[in-house]
Image (cartoon, rainbow, N blue to C red):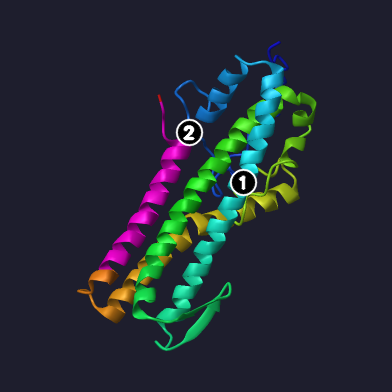
């Protein structure tokens, strides 16, 4: 028995609330977002029992991705805060992080921006995976739970999207939904672009100003920090808006 339950869509999905600050998903060249199209193609070839099993597996994987997204995002902001604290502090200052004691050093100051860049890129990849899970989950849930989907109840069972609050969480045009979308756009823009780009630029300036433009480790850290941020932004754009055959 193949999945045949069909329901009319609730209407166009709001353009905001997807990747923090905007709508749009990667399309596969057939007028349907790529992940949605692949999910629909899969549903057309499997039984209802297989679809139910996959939906359960997808939900478990989605939760793990959500936890990884939260960890990497929080770690990024902690590293940013630590760099800001150490770069202007005396070299002999000592501090403790998660039970481990560290002392401020020139090497630590130099590597923190590169570490922050890596954590940002990792957060981007996890956010894209979270959104891919949301796309596929929506298609499967609509087919298998049409009445619940019609009432927007799939929004309640989605895992938390972490500090970035990516994905779709609000439906309707009420004041609460509009407020939620507005905050999502603001926070998403800050997390996705403004803070990472600003920190990469600021940390580069501070390192070069403090250690000089000929310090090899500083130049390597600056290069890695900028490269990770650019790669993260490009990855996000290609994943959500790029095309695939």
> For numbered disc 2, what is the local secondary structure?
loop
| Residue 30 position in % (x across, y down) | 48, 20
Residue 185 visible in the shown view = no
Quarter of the image for residue 237 reads: top left
Quarter of the image for residue 224 reads: bottom left
- The residue closer to the viewer here, 100 or 218, is 100
The answer to whether residue 153 is left or right of residue 190 is right
| Residue 193 position in % (x across, y down) | 46, 56
Classed neighbour count for the residue bearing mark 2: other residues with Cα under 10 Å, few (<14), some (14–19), many (≥20): some
- The residue closer to the viewer here, 21 or 239, is 239
Return the residue found at the far left: 214
Q: Quadrant of the N terminus?
A: top right
Residue 56 visible in the shown view = yes
Instruction: Specify whether residue 33 is painted magenta.
Output: no
The residue labelled by disc 2 is 26
In space, the residues marked 1 and 2 are separated at their CA atoms by 23 Å
The residue labelled by disc 1 is 64
> For numbered disc 1, what is the local secondary structure?
helix
Is residue 123 positioned above or below 219 on the image?
Answer: above
* Point 20% across, 74% down: residue: 214
**Of circles 1 and 2, which is in front?**
1
Earlier-in-chain disc, 1 versus 2? 2
| Residue 145 position in % (x across, y down) | 76, 26
| Range drawn in magenta | 219-244
Q: Quadrant of the C terminus?
A: top left
Is residue 76 positioned above or below 5 on the image?
Answer: below
Instruction: Specify whether residue 240 is painted magenta.
Output: yes
Is residue 219 positioned above or below 4 on the image?
Answer: below
- The residue closer to the viewer here, 220 or 36, is 220
């Amino acid at each position: 028995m193949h999945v045949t339950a069909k329901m009319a869509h609730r209407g166009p999905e709001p353009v905001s609330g997807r990747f923090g600050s905007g709508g749009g998903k990667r399309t596969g060249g057939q007028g349907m977002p790529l992940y949605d199209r692949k999910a629909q193609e899969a549903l057309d070839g499997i039984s209802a029992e297989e679809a139910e099993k996959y939906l359960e597996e997808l939900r478990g994987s989605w939760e793990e991705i959500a936890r990884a997204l939260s960890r990497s995002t929080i770690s990024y902001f902690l590293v940013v805060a630590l760099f800001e604290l150490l770069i202007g502090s005396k070299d002999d200052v000592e501090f403790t992080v998660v039970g481990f004691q560290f002392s401020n050093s020139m090497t630590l100051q130099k590597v923190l921006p590169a570490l922050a860049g890596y954590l940002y890129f990792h957060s981007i990849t996890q956010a894209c995976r979270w959104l891919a899970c949301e796309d596929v989950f929506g298609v499967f849930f609509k087919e298998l739970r049409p009445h619940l989907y019609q009432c927007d109840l799939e929004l309640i069972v989605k895992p938390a999207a972490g500090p970035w609050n990516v994905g779709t969480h609000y439906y309707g045009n009420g004041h609460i939904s509009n407020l939620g979308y507005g905050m999502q756009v603001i926070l998403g823009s800050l997390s996705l672009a403004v803070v990472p780009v600003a920190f990469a630029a600021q940390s580069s300036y501070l390192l070069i100003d403090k250690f000089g433009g000929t310090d090899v480790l500083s130049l390597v850290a600056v290069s890695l920090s900028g490269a990770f941020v650019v790669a993260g932004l490009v990855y996000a754009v290609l994943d959500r808006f790029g095309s695939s055959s």
